[in-house]
Image: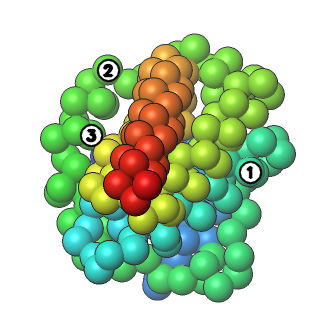
Amino acid sequence: MTPAEISTRALLDALAEGRCGASPMTLGGVLDEFRARAFGIYLLIVILPAFIPLPAGAGAVSGPLVSLAGLQLMALMAHPWVPGFLSRRPLPPERLARFRDRSSGMLRRLEKVSRPRSEWAIDHPAARLFTGLLLVVLGALLALPIPFTNYPFGLLLMAYAIALIERDGRLLVVAWVLGVAEIVTVALFSSQMAQWLADLFA
């Protein structure tokens, strides 16, 4: 299986077993090896903190990195750029293995229906702009200290990652709809919460 053809589960297996690129495996090395699917792979890696138990504030790590990918899609970049200190950072196979094991059920279900199709939603400049805009907003929301949102945002962003890796435009369109719905829900919840607080301290 070539880097351009690799499925999401096969990719995670290779990452978890340290079979991608040189040793030690780094983020930059993985993105270079799987260049054709690099944005999806980048998203998959940076949302890891949403699925692995970490101290509070994990979203503050993942959120800006998701938004960074969104800005680069909006700029129509062909390959994600990451700062040197992140590009050279080793990827711990044990964390990747835990992520693979925790998400195996969802991955299995998505892979049954995911395949290259409606690729205009992946490649068309207007579609890339829209995907990038949603990722910028979702990344910003993920970075906020909103309780109990890491996992829902992580699941949604996983759908974006798988759609980009598998080049499944239909799944990406579904992710667009869910992304807009999540943004609207958070906005309404925040507005309602602000009103409650205003009423409480009035």
Badge 1 density bin: few <14, some 14–19, many ≥20, Cα 10 Å: many
- The residue mark sitting in front, 3 or 1, is 1
Q: Which residue is mark 1?
A: 71
Compare marks 3 and 2 and give the one earlier in the sequence.
3
* Residue at the image position 80 percent from the left and 28 percent from the top: 125
In the image, what residue type sits under mark 1? Leu
Q: Which residue is mark 3?
A: 107
Can residue 78 be seen in the rendering of this structure? no
Q: Real-space Cα distance between discs 3 and 2?
A: 10 Å
Badge 3 density bin: few <14, some 14–19, many ≥20, Cα 10 Å: some
Q: Which residue is mark 2?
A: 113
* Residue at the image position 49 percent from the left and 22 percent from the top: 177
In the image, what residue type sits under mark 2? Val
- Local SS, label 2: helix
User: Looking at the picture, how far across and down is residue 165, in whole percent?
Assistant: 50, 40
* Residue at the image position 48 percent from the left and 82 percent from the top: 90
* Residue at the image position 54 percent from the left and 46 percent from the top: 138
Where the N terminus falls, by quadrant? top left
In the image, what residue type sits under mark 3? Leu
- The residue mark sitting in front, 1 or 2, is 1
Compare marks 1 and 2 and give the one earlier in the sequence.
1
Farthest-out residue, right: 75
CB under 8 Å between callouts 3 and 1? no
In the picture, measured across the screen, residue 125 lies left or right of residue 67, that is right
